[in-house]
């Protein structure tokens, strides 16, 4: 009987361990994607836009769902600047699904990066679910060292989005894509039920796994007090 209980308990313990590791792995992968994209310089996100971004989200390896026409699905993380400018918030894990996310999807592994540029965009991000286009305006972000001409569209867009697939990096549309917090993963990371709003407002202590992500963000878009994220 004791042997049978052991056979049951060990797989459950292993399953729990891997469940806990997966969200933190997602944070580390997001840091790697952002670092690789920004290191490309002339083919990267303009640093002046990244410096102005209120929130930054990364979804590594966005997938096409083969049995549903046009469906896409991925998981990633998002962080926001504190209103006081004192460092980045803890990361909230998110899921993104559906939408017309560009021709690159389905051509192999596709990484998605998006930036929330103003308070209107943050308000939408704090919700339990929102759809890009219907609830928040978005546009394909410009690529290069600098954004140069700040057009009216660029200035008023709530979200700027990019994707990278097979080495090709470009601004993309997120029209129709739905973003929602991954409550289960956040519960695993923070040890309790916590809302996305609490996390992104800086009310939750960040995990150690977030340090590589902060390092990349502070390299290209330092906050007024980046030391708080070390």
Image (cartoon, helix red, strand yellow):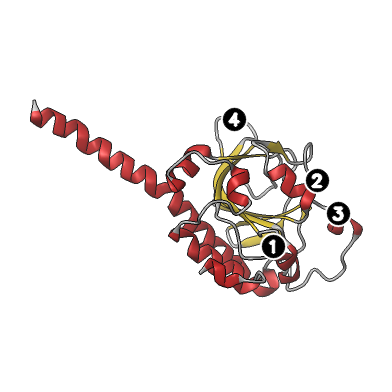
- Mark 3 → mark 2, Cα distance in angstroms: 8 Å
- Mark 1 or mark 2, which is nearer the start of the sequence? 1
Mark toward the start of the polypeptide (4 vs 3) = 4
**Reading the chain from its start, which is encountered first: label 3 or label 2?**
2
What residue appears at the point 55 percent right and 30 percent down from the top-left corner?
67
Q: Is residue 204 left or right of residue 141?
A: left
| Residue that carries the numbered disc 2 in the rendered image | 137
Secondary structure state at the residue bearing disc 3: helix
Q: Which mark is nearer the camera, 2 or 1?
A: 1
Which of marks 2 and 4 precedes in the sequence?
A: 4
10 Å crowding of disc 3: few (<14), some (14-19), many (20+): some
Q: Which residue is mark 3?
A: 156
Q: Is 201 situated left or right of 186 in this image? A: right
Residue 28, label in figure: none
- Tell which tag, 4 or 2, sits nearer the viewer: 2
Quarter of the image where one finds residue 147: bottom right
The residue furthest right is 152
Q: Position of residue 45 (x, y in %)?
A: 69, 65
Q: Is residue 98 above or below residue 39?
A: above
Please state which of residues 58 and 106 is positioned toward the viewer in this rendering: 58
Q: Nearer the viewer, residue 209 or 15?
A: 209
Mark number, residue 68: 4
Taking 103 as reference, is 111 left or right? left
Between disc 4 and disc 3, the foreground one is: 3
Per the model, the C-alpha gap separating discs 3 and 1 is 22 Å
Residue 207 appears in the figure = yes
Is there a contact, CB below 8 Å, between mark 3 and mark 2? yes
Do the numbered discs 3 and 1 sit on residues whose CB atoms are within 8 Å? Answer: no
Q: Which numbered circle lies on residue 84?
A: 1
Marks 1 and 4, Cα distance to the nearest angstrom? 44 Å
């Amino acid at each position: 009987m004791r042997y049978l209980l052991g056979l049951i308990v060990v797989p459950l313990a292993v399953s729990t361990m891997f469940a806990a590791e997966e969200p933190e792995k997602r944070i580390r992968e997001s840091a790697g994607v952002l670092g690789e994209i920004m290191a490309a310089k002339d083919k990267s996100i303009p640093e002046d836009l990244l410096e102005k971004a209120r929130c930054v989200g990364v979804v590594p390896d966005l997938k096409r769902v083969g049995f549903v026409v046009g469906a896409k699905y991925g998981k990633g993380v998002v962080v926001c600047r504190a209103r006081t400018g004192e460092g980045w918030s803890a990361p909230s894990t998110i899921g993104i699904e559906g939408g017309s996310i560009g021709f690159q999807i389905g051509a192999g592994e596709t990484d998605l990066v998006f930036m929330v540029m103003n308070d209107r965009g943050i308000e939408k991000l704090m919700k339990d679910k929102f759809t890009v286009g219907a609830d928040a305006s978005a546009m394909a972000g410009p690529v290069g060292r600098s954004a140069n001409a700040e057009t009216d569209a660029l200035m008023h867009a709530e979200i700027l989005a990019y994707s990278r697939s097979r080495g090709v990096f470009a601004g993309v549309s997120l029209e129709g894509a739905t973003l929602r917090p991954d409550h289960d993963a956040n519960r695993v990371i923070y040890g309790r039920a916590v809302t996305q709003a609490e996390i992104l407002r800086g009310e939750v202590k960040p995990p150690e796994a977030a340090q590589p992500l902060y390092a990349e963000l502070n390299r290209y878009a330092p906050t007024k007090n980046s030391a708080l994220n070390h």
